[in-house]
Amino acid sequence: MADLFTPLLAEEPAREALADGAMLLRGLALPFASALIEAIHGIAAISPFRHMVTAGGHAMSVATTNCGAAGWVSDRSGYRYDAIDPETRKPWPEMPECFAALAELAAIQAGHAQFRPDACLINRYVPGARLSLHQDRNERDFAQPIVSVSLGLPAIFRFGGIRRNDPVRKFALHHGDVVVWGGPARLRFHGVAELKDGFHDQLGRQRINLTFRRAR
Ligand code: MD3
Ligand code: FE
């Protein structure tokens, strides 16, 4: 599979270690961006973006959908992965080939061979939307990394420690940036600051983030 990407990797990608286990691959998704955006429109036509409700009963400011065999869902009873979209009562749309290929490429670049995501959570931010500090712990095997892909407007990402009150660092994630979160970074608290207004050529007034996971 890695051979398919050789033309894209004629130059070494800019790799930046954010922390032990967290690798930023700036611009890695740029050659895929148009294909990813087209695929996102196709997914949202089947399983629309919606504002899920947290266990505490608040609608999230971020709108969400999923593709793949498992999708992340939240409601008054809590967070979990489910093969069925609760809105459509049908399976989530299949994971497009360009999604799986990019996730695998990124994982290989960060030293995680054999990453085969079964879930892709798609988050949509409009100006003002934010994601409060949290850990991702609904997946079965924390040895599996999470790959995140940023598209559209830039966001300030907040990266904490393994305890909620650990200090938080901030850095910007731009269109095309990919981060692989594995090893000791896998259970660190993280969030996204309120999205600033702006306009992106391909996505307009929004940011879309893909997170690829091995849920089961
Ligand atoms: C660090 N999404 O969906 S991606 C999420 O931009 C989520 O929509 C954010 O956090 C977004 O759960 C951030 C970056 C990210 C994803 C998973 C992580 C960072 C992570 C898991 C562990 C540590
Ligand atoms: Fe998260």
Image (cartoon, rainbow, N blue to C red):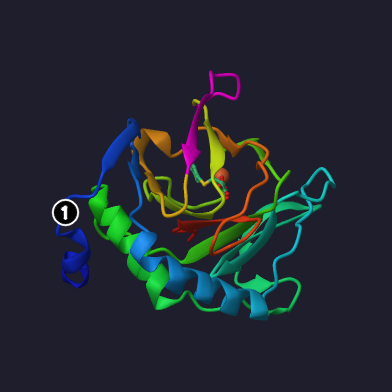
Query: Residue 205 placed where, x, y %?
Result: 66, 56
- Within 10 Å of disc 1 (Cα), the crowding (few <14, some 14-19, many 20+) is few
The quadrant the N terminus occupies is bottom left
Residue range of the region highlighted in magenta in the rendering = 162-173
Image: 200 above or below 156: below
> Looking at the image, which residue is at 35% across and 42% down?
24
Where is residue 97? Give x, y as percent. 39, 77
Q: Which residue is mark 1?
A: 11
Name the side, left or right, on which 47 lies relative to 159: right
- For the point 70% across and 47% down, the residue is 127
Whether residue 156 is visible here, answered yes or no, is yes
> From what the image shows, is residue 204 above or below residue 145?
below
Q: Quadrant of residue 63?
A: bottom right
Quadrant of residue 142 in the image? Answer: top left
Q: Can the viewer see residue 137 in this picture?
A: no
Q: Nearer the viewer, residue 184 or 205?
A: 205
Q: Measured from the top left, where is residue 35 in percent x and y?
A: 44, 74
